[in-house]
Image (cartoon, helix red, strand yellow):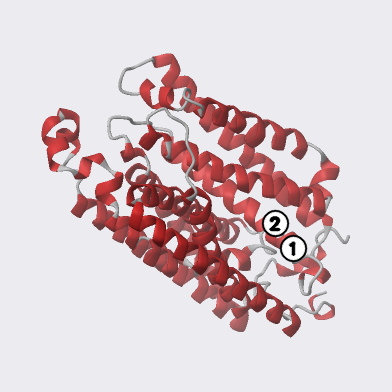
Amino acid sequence: MTAHIPLDTPPALVEEIARWRNRLLLIGLVALAACAVGAFFNPDQFFRSYLWVYVFLIGVTMGSMAFAMLQYLTGGAWGVVIVRLCESAARTMPLLAVLFIPLAFGIPRLYVWSHHGAVAADHVLAHKSTYLNIPFFLGRAAFYFAGWGLLAWFLNKWSARQDGTGTSPAYRHLRTVSAGGLLFYGYSVTFMCIDWVMSIDPHWFSTIFGMLFIAGQGLSALAFLITLLILLSNRPPFSAVLTHRHIHDLGKLLLAFVMLWAYLAFSQFLIIWAGNLPDEIPWYMERLRGGWQYIGLALVFVHFALPFALLLSRDLKRDYRLLTYVAVLIILMRLVDIYWLVAPGFRKGQFGVSWMDFLVPAGLGGLWLAAFAWQLPRRALLPLGDPHLEEALEHGRE
């Protein structure tokens, strides 16, 4: 079957991706230049907007890399069509490491635990100061990026070698790296979200927060991958490979992640609300008043209920156009969800949106998408040496 289907990336597609890359890069640079002006007049708002957008982009990247590792461990036809998209996202990790530098400079404006006076006056902050201090915070971030970068490098190295030498021993190396990599992913993302998001309010804690972020990253990445895959579905090589069954499988997985995210989010809310402890309940009180409660309701109905109801339909999960609409809606609501997690910690119960909350996503998002578009055509869009490639090509054709 493989011999009868052209799997090479055509030059016309490479040129089209290059045009989009240049447009996205221009949008990103112009938006970031405007944000730099805003940062001069209102640095606090700049760093707050930068943080939540950056957390979203890290989520798409890490979620994509996790799906690549999951595919190498479990196999199957569903992941073959997205694995090279996942690897392209993983190769943007050096850019994200560089983009973390502004956050390092913004620590004093983002985290109260970075101020010696606040720590000295608060016994809770003093107790947590062994963990929450600037040198250790930056050291942990460096450790995360080193681990993520190594994972991305090894996955792409052995994946490229698999294309040239076949499935063995490259595939065994990919499975070995993925087994340890998924463990590192789970632990590192848990500590990352504690460091970068939970510590905005250092008095608050949740034992579900790490799992909630992992589910959210998987949901963000999968919605992005589905959107991109469908956009490429009428262009070679995907036009010759992709079937409704591939899209149906990914749609079912998207439904599963919608339910997982909702389950974890509601579990966290239910446990904290029922416990009614003074160290935990204020975090939700800030997000259920002053206008933030409407964002919370939007998350319930637009992030969960609407996608859940739509994705129950088998026909919708096989319809390229309708599934794209659902995936884009989920991407937008993922942005809203992260904003709802981050922004109220600074606004203290009063809803508000800054113009930088719109420009920073355009700036960082444009820059990241341009880097992704630069990486995408550098490898074959399908893993030519993958042992499940033949199964993927036959998927939905029998």
Q: Secondary structure at mark 2?
A: helix
User: Residue shown at 79%/76% (left/top)?
Assistant: 2
Instruction: List the residue tagged with mark 1.
Output: 231
Q: CA distance from mark 2 to mark 1?
A: 6 Å
Q: Nearer the viewer, residue 370 or 39?
A: 39
Give the residue type at disc 1.
Leu
Within 10 Å of the Cα at label 1, are there few (<14), some (14-19), or many (20+) other Cα atoms? some
Residue picked out by circle 2: 227
Is label 2 in contact with label 1 (beta carbons under 8 Å)? Answer: yes
Query: Image point 69% across, 48% down: which residue?
Result: 327
Residue name at image x 39 percent, y 45 percent: 193
| Residue furthest right as drawn | 398
Query: Does residue 304 appear left or right of residue 281 in this picture?
Result: right
Asked if residue 109 is positioned above or below residue 388 in the image, the reply reads above
At which x and y percent is residue 356?
Answer: 47, 51
**Three-letter amino acid code at disc 2?**
Thr
